Amino acid sequence: MSHSPAPMKQLALDIGLAPVPTLDNFVTVGNELALEHLRLWAGNPLRSPVPTFLWGAGGSGKTHLLSAVGETLREHGSRVGWIDAARLHPGEYDDQWDAVLLDDCHLYTAEQQAAAFNWFINAQNPAYGPARWVLAAADRPPADLQLREDLRTRLGWGHVFQLQALGETERRAVLRRAADERGVSLGDDVMDFMLTRFSRDLTSLMLLLDQLDAYALRTQRGITIPLIKSMLENE
């Protein structure tokens, strides 16, 4: 009797393969303007702090980009406020922040909405000095958010970018091109296995490809499904 992999083991593998989000390892296909905008402002959040809003379907890279912006700001010595759906009690606004990042806005509870509105207003309040940058994200445009009206309208005040998630055909083409650039041969069966057994997030797939390439070189084997299983068992 065969047994499928334990869910916890598979989850651990997915977490282990997840790269640290950066602006450099975000796959930009279809989202070049949004990435250019974030690079410009993350380098200097006080440069022209008009609020920015990102929206798109799951897997389009919203959380990746917000996390990457947060890391970039911290690397420049900035402090940031962060709310996502998992942070149930966000707390008070801190006037030492240089930016406010609001992820998963479409999932906010009443308490989170109240905190997000408070943070947004204070970030733009001249009493605290120069206006701070507010970067927010959700799965739909601001006008369609089921949020309190004063927060919903403010989220749509500034720059709004729709992020494009890659379709199956585009995802396969990008993965195939990345493999070709590494001199790696990926059969259709291997491609199917990678896309069905692991995170379909393209950034994670790129890291998986790097790890498979290194493991194949080390073991002097081609990339096959047995090789992938061997790597997962031994790495």
Image (tube, helix red, strand yellow):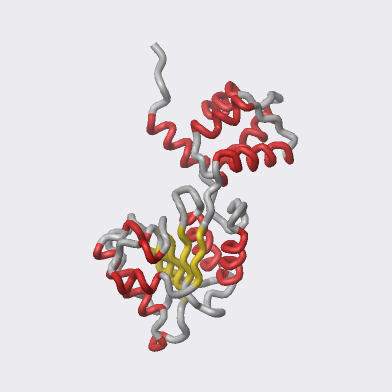
Q: Is residue 126 visible?
A: yes
Q: Is residue 173 above or below residue 155?
A: above
Residue 154 sits in quarter: bottom left
Q: Is residue 179 above or below residue 128?
A: above
| 79 sits left or right of 207 in the view | left
Q: Quadrant of the C terminus?
A: top right
| 76 sits left or right of 121 in the view | right
Q: Residue at x 33, y 71 (%)?
A: 151
Q: Is residue 207 visible?
A: no
Q: Residue at x 60, y 70 (%)?
A: 40
Q: Residue furthest top?
A: 1
Residue 190 position in % (x across, y down): 60, 27
Residue 162 position in % (x across, y down): 50, 60
Q: Residue at x 51, y 67 (%)?
A: 74
Residue 5 position in % (x across, y down): 42, 25
Q: Residue at x 45, y 72 (%)?
A: 134
Residue 111 sits in quarter: bottom left
Q: Residue furthest front?
A: 143
